[in-house]
Image: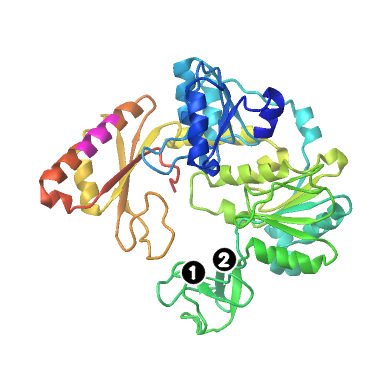
Amino acid sequence: MDAALTALLGEGRHAVLTADAGPEKRYRQWLAVRRGAVHAVIGTRAAMFAPVQDLGLVALWDDGDDSHSEPHAPQPHAREVLLLRAAQDRCGFLLGGWSCTVEAAQLVETGWARPLVAVRDRVRTAAPLVRTVGDGDLARDEAARAARLPTLAWQAVREGLRSGPVLVQVPRRGYVPRMACAACRAPARCRHCAGPLEAPDAAALTCGWCGRPEEKWHCPECGGFRLRAQVVGARRTAEELGRAFPAVPVRTSGREQVLDTVPGTPALVVSTPGAEPVAEGGYAAALLLDGWAMLGRPDLRAGEDALRRWIGAAALVRPQTVGGTVVVVAEPTLRPVQALVRWDPVGHAVRELGERAELGFPPVSRMAAVSGAPDAVSAFLAAVELPAEAEVLGPVPLPVTSAGRPRRVGAPPPGERWERALVRVPPGSGAALAAALKAAQAARTARGASASGEAGAGAVRVRVDPPDIG
């Protein structure tokens, strides 16, 4: 975007607001925007607050990417902030992406926005050919089951390497991020903190939580001493493909090093989701491995997120009119897989929106998560004056977080037992729910400042429309 605006407007006619620029340059850019010296701003999540003078258009690309959601309070989402700015400044609002979120489908269904989509003939001409490999295909190919690459995938790689690079998307980074007993398939865990054991390279075995090395592991279930890979990461996949195609260069793109572009010459490019580099002339083929890892997450958005990551990688492949092929290793009967085959993310989002409306899930309804110690949550729910139409679900226990394990925002501190209650209200009552929760939280904080007994009950965390509803 920076290069495109420089070519269109000229040097110094727009501002770029990103954390990588450093505080001095970022503040200088912000002052130029504030004083009206520049009238175009691009950037990452924080650019949603840029004080652009005489705002005429706000635009957001790929609103389903979780990097658009601020993890710190008050946890704004770039889409919601830009929607408010567009309404207040009466300017244009543009939401784009290869995929379509449920929130975007709701904007169109309510009449607030209009769809800008290509006709089906144009889509079929520009999209690659998508083929699927399900459990039935793997069952008929035992060698492919062990290698995670069925015959169809091998053929697609061989054919693609004749004319250009081939993209391989792997959901997990690292070498072998999850291990299991080779005999009983029980997950291999650390003796000290019960964290998952992983192999950062071909020889070492360490805990993924506390980092302690494990040299004499044995299975507590069956007593076995042999391990197998439960989940294979991008580095191990690149190593296996390098041995299978020794004459072809293998490049990796992920957390350690993200590639921007790769040449259009034959090569294997192994990438984690979101780090796929752009190939000159497009990829000849793409493999989307381990679809179960993304579809099997206990999350309301698992299917939507999987489709978004798949279609983002498939969009980098050449059209099927020139031989572009995508092979996805996932059960073909699942709805996200079918949406990818048909290249119909809008239809998937509309159907998902309809089902959420029947179940009362966001974004059709407004929902708030109240989490904390059991006594604190019970006291908070008893004190808050919820709207008459509010429905309280729970509370239910949250998984206990072990020491050393990476903790998500809103998760309980290590070793503490927390509960979470969900408060749901119908459309139109979201503001009343937020006001009631805010008043109860303020009153509780005031009582805690004056009463030592209340302060010992622990914190209560409140989040409206949490993104991780399981």
Q: Is residue 439 magenta?
A: yes
Q: Amino acid at mark 2?
A: Pro
Callout count: 2
Name the residue rendered at 57%, 42% in the picture.
304
Residue named by callout 2: 177
Q: Quadrant of residue 436?
A: top left
Height in image: 362 above or below 310? above
Report the quarter where the N terminus lies.
top right
* Badge 1 element: loop
Q: CA distance from mark 1 to mark 2?
A: 8 Å
Name the residue rendered at 26%, 29% in the picture.
387
Of all residues, the one furthest to the right in this rendering is 162
Magenta residues, start to end: 435-442
Callout 1 touching callout 2 (CB < 8 Å): yes
Pick the front one: 355 or 467: 467
Left or right, 96 with reference to 465: right
Q: Quadrant of residue 241?
A: bottom right
Left or right, 185 with reference to 375: right
Pick whichever of labels 1 and 2 is earlier in the sequence.
2
Residue named by callout 1: 196
